Structures are given as structure tokens and as C-alpha cells.
Amino acid sequence: MSFVARRYGISPSLPFSWKRRMLEGGHQAVQADEEVVGTSRVRELERRVRDLERLLGRKTMEVEILKEALDLARIKKTTSPLTSWSGSTGGSR
């Protein structure tokens, strides 16, 4: 291992340090009883979260627009000339 490290111009202790850190990380994941997931899976899940957040934002905006439209419709309904005209005559013709 030391020969290969020196051949590529890195400190011989560096690969051993990487190995130790990798094993420590693995032990921590096992101790935490968590699944070890590859980076490609993590990227895929992050992409899905972004897509879902985007979709949630779009739906939230649609709901807000619909609420405003309902509020305007209620206001127009209560101030409609037909409603006030029929109400003022008592409903009789």
C-alpha cells in the first residue's frame, strides 16, 4: 500500500486514514441502526424531494388563488343588485 501511495505522490498514511474513517463511519451507521445508502440513491431521493416541494408549492398557490376567487364571489353575491332589489320588494310581485 505504501509503494502505491508513494507512486501516486500521496502520503502513505493517507489511504490508511481513509480506510479508518470509512470503517468508523460504517460502525457509526451500524450502531445507529441506520441503513447505509449509496450517493446515487441519496441524489435520487433529493431530486424527488425537490420535485415534490415544487409540486406542493404549485398546489398551495392554486389553493390560495381559489380561496381569493371564492372570497370575491361571496362579496359579489352579497352586494349583487338582484339580491338587494328582490330583498327590498319583500319578494312579492
Image (cartoon, rainbow, N blue to C red):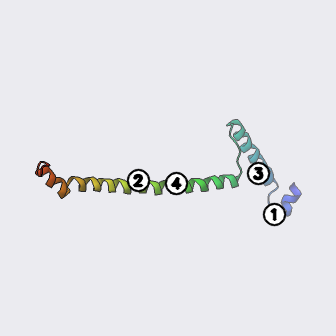
Question: Mark 3 or mark 4, which has the lower sequence index?
Answer: 3
Tag 4: amino acid = Glu
Of the two numbered discs 2 and 1 in the rendering, the one whose residue sits closer to the viewer = 2
> How far apart in space, not on screen, are marks 1 and 3 (Cα)?
16 Å
Tag 1: amino acid = Gly
Of the two numbered discs 2 and 4 in the rendering, the one whose residue sits closer to the viewer = 2
Numbered disc 3: secondary structure: helix
Q: Which residue is mark 4?
A: 53
Q: Which residue is mark 1?
A: 9
Q: Where residue 72 is drawn, which disc sits there?
A: none
Image quadrant assignment for residue 7 = bottom right
Percent position of residue 62, x then y: 42, 56
Mark 1 crowdedness (10 Å alpha carbons): few <14, some 14-19, many ≥20: few
Of the two numbered discs 1 and 3 in the rendering, the one whose residue sits closer to the viewer = 3
> How far apart in space, not on screen, are marks 3 and 4 (Cα)?
36 Å
> How far apart in space, not on screen, are marks 2 and 1 (Cα)?
60 Å
Tag 2: amino acid = Val
Numbered disc 2: secondary structure: helix
> How far apart in space, not on screen, are marks 2 and 4 (Cα)?
15 Å
Question: Mark 1 or mark 3, which has the lower sequence index?
Answer: 1
Tag 3: amino acid = Trp
54 relative position to 39: left or right:
left
Q: Which residue is mark 3?
A: 18
Between 45 and 16, the one lying in front of the other is 45
Numbered disc 4: secondary structure: helix
Q: Is residue 35 above or below residue 79?
A: above
Seen at 70% across and 55% down, the residue is 40
Image quadrant assignment for residue 50 = bottom right
Between 93 and 44, the one lying in front of the other is 93
Percent position of residue 84, x then y: 15, 53
Q: Tell me if label 2 and label 4 are in contact, CB under 8 Å.
A: no
Q: Where residue 63 is drawn, which disc sits there?
A: 2
